[in-house]
Image: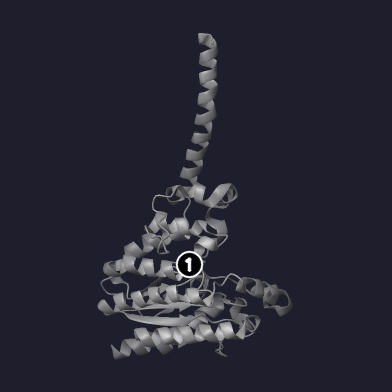
């Protein structure tokens, strides 16, 4: 090969590798510069830590349905969409020593909480966001600290979600717009189709398939027991609440599954001395309070949170 041919070949080879690398670096920087609920919540919890007395944990039911700004004590929500019990516990373990005034932790549970695994879900990318932003892995045994997706958000998201995030920016998947200063995201209105049981119940029955076998619930219960033990050491009261759902929602599930869930939560509360409250089926929450069959809308979240504050938090505060 002549020297001139070698130089041309080297340039082409360099461009072949350098251009894609430059594009990847650009996309990575753009993604990491785009604010999302994980970054916002991490910065907020660290900023508010000295004065917080109540912390909310849970999945989308708490993210949309519990509004800390109406509570009678300084509160913040670290709940998020598809957040698992394992991640709830890891977040609590990470921050409990940094919250000197913490008195209460509200752990929201739903039928999906005890058996749901992020690594088995279509939105597995969220798991890596927790590692990147919070330094937690969520699942015991899911050691992803050194996984490329834990430090590259574009690899975690994949091509389509990366472009979506860059293009939509603050509106991306509702991560910023609608998120208030206390970590709560309010969903407006009512999804008429989702309250139409002919349309929604088949979807719910499909969701039931994502609930892992009940023998896997023991792992979640062990993790929640660890949470209760650690909180007790710090003099913090654990409050376990079952998320409200529209009355027809539970009709789509296997009745034995529902009974087993309630029994598991009841047993957990007895074993850990956690305060257990259940507003599911509360007649004060009507159809207009729900966005869909199992998520409260803005008005419903405000109503439910004020009831919760008056009947749970204020009473606990009066007896401390």
Q: Between 46 and 139, which is closer to the camera in this rendering? A: 139
At x 49%, y 35%, the residue is 21
Residue 23, image x, y percentages:
52, 37
Where is the C terminus found, in terms of image quarters? bottom left
Q: Which residue: 53% across, 34% down?
A: 20
User: Which percent across, then down, holds residue 108?
Assistant: 46, 77
Position of residue 319 relative to residue 191, above or below, is below
Res. 249 image quadrant: bottom right
Above or below: residue 317 compared with residue 75:
below
Question: Which quadrant of the rendered structure holds the N terminus?
Answer: top right
| Drawn side of residue 22 relative to residue 145, left or right | right
Residue that lies at the very extreme toward the right in this rendered image: 198
- Disc 1 marks which residue? 83
Vertical arrangement, residue 223 with respect to residue 278, above or below: above
Q: Is 124 or 108 nearer to us in this picture?
A: 124
Which residue is outermost to the front? 215
Q: Where is residue 221 in the image (x, y as percent from the top left)?
A: 42, 77
**Residue found 45% across the figure and 69% down from its top:** 79
Of the pair 295 and 210, the residue shown nearer to us: 210
Question: Horizontal and vertical percent for residue 242?
Answer: 49, 82
The image quarter containing residue 195 is bottom right
For the point 53% across and 24% down, which residue is it? 13
């Amino acid at each position: 090969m002549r020297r001139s041919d070698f130089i041309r070949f080297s340039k082409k080879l360099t461009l072949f590798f350098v251009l894609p690398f430059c594009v990847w670096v650009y996309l990575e920087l753009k993604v990491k510069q785009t604010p999302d609920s994980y970054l916002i919540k991490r910065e907020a919890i660290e900023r508010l830590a000295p004065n917080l007395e109540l912390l909310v944990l849970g999945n989308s039911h708490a993210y949309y349905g519990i509004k800390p700004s109406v509570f009678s004590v300084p509160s913040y929500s670290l709940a998020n969409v598809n957040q698992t019990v394992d991640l709830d516990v890891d977040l609590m373990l990470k921050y409990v020593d940094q919250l000197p005034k913490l008195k209460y932790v509200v752990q929201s549970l739903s039928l999906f909480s005890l058996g749901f695994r992020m690594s088995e879900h279509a939105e597995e990318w969220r798991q890596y966001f927790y590692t990147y932003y919070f330094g937690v892995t969520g699942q015991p045994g899911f050691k992803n600290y050194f996984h490329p997706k834990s430090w590259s958000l574009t690899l975690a998201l994949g091509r389509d979600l990366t472009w979506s995030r860059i293009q939509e920016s603050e509106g991306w998947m509702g991560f910023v717009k609608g998120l208030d200063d206390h970590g709560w995201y309010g969903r407006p209105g009512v999804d008429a189709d989702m309250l139409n049981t002919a349309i929604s119940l088949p979807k719910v029955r499909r969701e039931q398939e994502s609930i892992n076998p009940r023998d896997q619930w023991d792992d979640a219960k062990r993790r929640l027991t660890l949470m209760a033990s650690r909180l007790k050491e710090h003099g913090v009261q654990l409050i376990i609440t079952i998320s409200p759902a529209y009355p027809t929602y539970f009709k789509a599930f296997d009745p034995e599954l529902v009974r087993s869930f309630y029994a598991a939560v009841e047993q957990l509360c007895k074993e850990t001395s956690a305060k257990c409250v259940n507003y599911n089926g509360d007649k004060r929450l009507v159809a207009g309070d729900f966005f869909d069959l199992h998520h409260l809308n803005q008005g419903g979240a405000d109503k439910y949170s004020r009831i919760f504050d008056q009947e749970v938090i204020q009473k606990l505060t009066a007896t401390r």
